[in-house]
Amino acid sequence: MFGKMRKVYGGFFRAGAQGAMAYRLNFMGFFIGESLYCFVMYFMWKAVFMASGESTFMGFTLVDMTMYVFLSNIVGFFTGTDSTRALAEEIRDGNIIMRMIKPVNVDLSLLANEVGNNVVYFAFIFAPVMLGVEIYRYCALGYVAFDIVSFLIFILSMILSYILSFYLNLIFGYLAFWLMNIWGFDILKGSIIKFFSGAMIPLAFFPGIVRDIFELLPFASMVYKPTMIYMGKISGVNILVALGEQIIWILVFYGIAKLLWHFAQKRLAVQGG
């Protein structure tokens, strides 16, 4: 079974990896921009700590906050997906037909292509950033705080986060069957995810009942929870709860995506053709 899937979707995977290598300068420009954003956020939070005159702010030390800024950004980067835009474009120009007539699963072919991209980015970006975070933590704390078990659970949580994000974005992409142009919805979706996922502000900073509600939403499982697992702020049985929530939301969005795809195939109309 695995060998058959590798044969069928291996081409999409290789195409994604080759695409990542072909547009290296574009990617590096984006990465530099994201890095500058992290440093701006670092200095902003440093100013907040200095103004408060306290060593901790809402349960976070400056070291914690610095790690959160860089970790949440790298998690958001690697769990982010372009499936909404890619699928919407194929629906609008009619190229979706080429996927539909092939003996492949549409969502798995898109997923394989994106995974090919991310494997390249993982090798060149993820490892250096994580090494830099750990070097910073060692210099700040004076001891090695890296824990291999937490790291492996973090990787698992990040994989689940990516799958969750992929199917959520796929749902928005399928809306193009009805709306044709979903540019505005895509912008709105990105803003909602960035805020409610904890990518901008840790959800722990919100008041009790608001925080509890935000943590139950699927967006918290995309960035906030994987990051907090790595930092050790989610531990013990709460890790299993967090992973379980990610799996539940994956199943929910997978089901919605399949339902939309069932109805969407009957409404295919190519704009301008």
Image: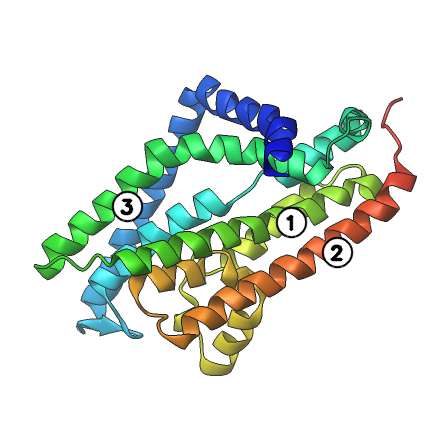
- Distance between mark 1 and mark 3 Cα atoms: 26 Å
The residue nearer to you, when weighing 102 against 201, is: 102
Any part of residue 188 in sight:
no
- Is the residue marked by circle 3 packed among few (<14), some (14-19), or many (20+) residues within 10 Å? some
- Where residue 245 appears, x then y in whole percent? 55, 67
Q: Amino acid at mark 2?
A: Ile
Q: Quadrant of the N terminus?
A: top right
> According to the image, what is the colour scheme of the structure?
rainbow
SS for tag 2? helix
**Mark 2 or 3, nearer chain start:** 3
- Farthest-out residue, left: 142
Q: Can residue 4 be seen by looking at this rendering?
A: yes
Q: Amino acid at mark 3?
A: Met
Q: Which residue is mark 1?
A: 167
Give the percent coordinates (x, y) of residue 16: 54, 26
Residue denoted by label 2: 256
Query: Which residue in the protein does label 3 denote?
Result: 130
Q: Element under label 1?
A: helix
Do labels 2 and 1 touch, CB within 8 Å?
yes
Q: Residue at x 29, y 74 (%)?
A: 59
Taking the view exactly as shown, the residue that stands out farthest to the bottom is: 209
Secondary element at tag 3: helix
Which amino acid, mark 1? Tyr
Q: CA distance from mark 2 to mark 1?
A: 9 Å
Q: Mark 2 and mark 3: span between their CA atoms?
A: 34 Å
On the image, the x and y values in percent for residue 121 come to 41, 33
* Count of picture labels: 3
Residue pictured at 34% horizontal, 40% vertical: 126
Between residue 138 and residue 201, name the one nearer to us: 138
Observer-nearest of 55 and 139: 139
Q: Quadrant of residue 29?
A: top left
